[in-house]
Amino acid sequence: MNLTELLLPTPESTFPLVAPLFCSGDNNILYTSIIQNSLRKIIPPSLLNLDQCTREGLREKKTILHSSLPLLNSCFAKPTTPTEVSFFALSHYRPNVFKFFFNMISSWLVPGKRLPVLMLYAVDFQLPQLCNEIYTLCEIMLSLQDGHELAAVHHNLPIIEAELRLGMSSAYYGNKILEIKGLSADQKTAILHEHAVDLIRRRPRDFDSDLLVEMQHLLVICSDKFKAARTTRHLNRIISIHYLFRKALLTALNEAPKRRLFHLKLFKARIGEQGGKKPVLGIILGVNFLKDKEVFNQRHVLCAIQHFIPNTEAVEGSFFANRHRHELIATIYLEVCKTDGEEFTFEEMRLLRRELPNDLQDHIEQPMQPIFTLRNEEEILRNIVQLSNEFTSPRHLPQVFISFDEQTPSDLLFTLIVLRAKHSSSTLSIEQLFSTHNSPLEYIPDRCREVGSLGNNSMKEATVFRVKLPKEPFLRRDFSINLVKARQKVSEELERILGLFRDFNGGMISQESQILAQLRQLLQGCSKYSGLLLENFFNSLYPASRRSTFDAVYLKHLFLLLLDTHKQATSLSLHHSHAFFRQEEGATHAVIYNVDSLSCNRIMHYLQNSCKWGQWNISYLTIHNILYCSCLLQSELPAEQQLFCSTIREALVPKEFS
């Protein structure tokens, strides 16, 4: 027996028992009769005849009925307009199935026009003689007023029926169909709410009723344009992952309140007004802040991504941050795309998943208040006198004093004092020299005076002026300003304009830059590291006076030991210090993980009293809120190496500092 055979009429059939899911007392017979009349227009008559059916016969009819669901039918009152047409649907029970049926029939039978609805009817019921399953019965009656509407309905009805069968069988396909046709903001919100409730029901360990609060909060943050261009599946993913990240951060902070935490989720998606084709990469971040004033927004995330994939840009209007008041955690969302419109490759995704979490931690900005100060004129005059005393012959190179002055929101300003020989009135002034060269430095004049004679009709000329340059090229990955690099740029430009000169107060700075450059060269190919971390390590070395004379080979081995120790940090206890030692030719290196300030003082005290000055160096460096102490002893004598190691171990033993 098949469905075609069951369509043959059986006028003497007895209708099966119908049981609505509500109890209406005396009206039960009325409601049951309405359901039966509607079912006769949908279900084949032979399926309704359960008289003298064996158990096998009932099972067969149930199988045929369920394999046929959803069942659809339509009845036109008359073939010409004006007329009424009724649409019937029978399906398995599913939340919001009637809403889907109503939206499709009323809005898409005649695209662009919502037809007048004369009657709505939907009911959930059971057929207890057949099985215990719940069914949903829907009926909608529409009014058609002209021939164009009637022709459109006849033309579109087969397509709509195919979409109804697919969408009423699966919530996923129902949502996809509505999205393709175009959901309103209210319809999307209803679907998102339905999905959130379903998640709470299916995964109670992961989600609770707070998910609904999180959903509402995120939907308020997002613009209507953002929601319109993304599918409900896309929005569902954002909401659920934001919720899980917030929950994980709050749990982890109870165990390690002083450790920087990062959670990252990457996924590829396509956005557009109606399921468009623009490929993007969605980035969801969960981060905790260690200080109230820390800043982490779109430019920080984008800068970190461009470090690995330069040809990326942020999707306009895609960034938002969910940070509740008084909480030191935030969840962040951003979409990026490639400038050439291509998709992100598997290798690029894998690179970002591996490297981005640690790299992002270096991009958290620590804002500082601007400093108000007045320039010390007495110091400028004293420096002019000092430069004049050094400049005693016309053959001497010009003497230059460069000092940082101030910063504005977009620029850095330096004050320069140039003392040089002026041979005649035809000698071009420094302002004229600047005007004849195309320089990124903006010249700001202050004063120019003769301060002495050199003989042979030559005079000493002292020129005080300021230069301004954009600070953007000198921002480090954590958005701090690299003043050393900016000063070096000023010095290079001044040499291009004036020629060779003596940098009076920059000798050691230049030497330190050379040592750091040597260290970078030695580290090439050794281990992957952050350039920002290397700079911080080098600049934290003590004694500071020896940074210009350090042996770069020894510093390389000490830095590599620091990197190895940091890689093991996740497996080390936050409640104890750990010392790691390594011996190389002519030097012994030590790195102490999670050292406290008291132990730092003891280590410094013991090294000063136990080791010869000039043989040891020490560095204190905080990486991701963990304090590391790096120590170096330059000695080949076993006794001194043993004393160095025992000194550090002894310093880590808790006791009163004396």
Image (cartoon, rainbow, N blue to C red):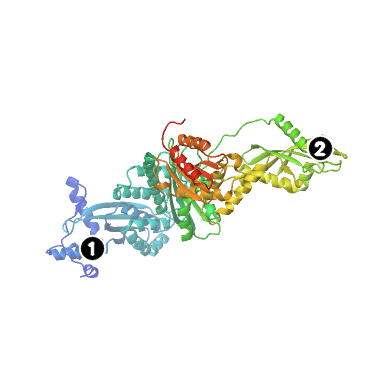
> Which x, y percent locates residue 422?
83, 40
Q: Amino acid at mark 2?
A: Lys
Relative image position of residue 383 (x, y in whole percent):
72, 34
Q: Which residue is mark 1?
A: 65
Judge whether 619 appears above or below 93 on screen.
above
Q: Nearer the viewer, residue 176 or 300?
A: 300
Q: In the image shown, does 579 or 204 lie closer to the viewer?
A: 579
Q: Quadrant of residue 113?
A: bottom left
Measured as percent of width and height from the top left, residue 514 is found at 63, 48
Amino acid under disc 1: Leu
Mark seen at residue 460 = 2
Q: Quadrant of residue 367?
A: top right
Tell me the SS state at disc 1.
helix
**Which residue is located at x 53 percent, y 41 percent?**
618
Q: Is residue 516 visible?
A: yes
Report if residue 144 is visible in the image.
Answer: no
**Count of numbered badges drawn on the protein:** 2
Q: Quadrant of the N terminus?
A: bottom left
**Image-based side of 64 in relation to 543, left or right:** left
Q: Secondary structure at mark 2?
A: strand
Q: Where 167 sits versus 617, above or below?
A: below
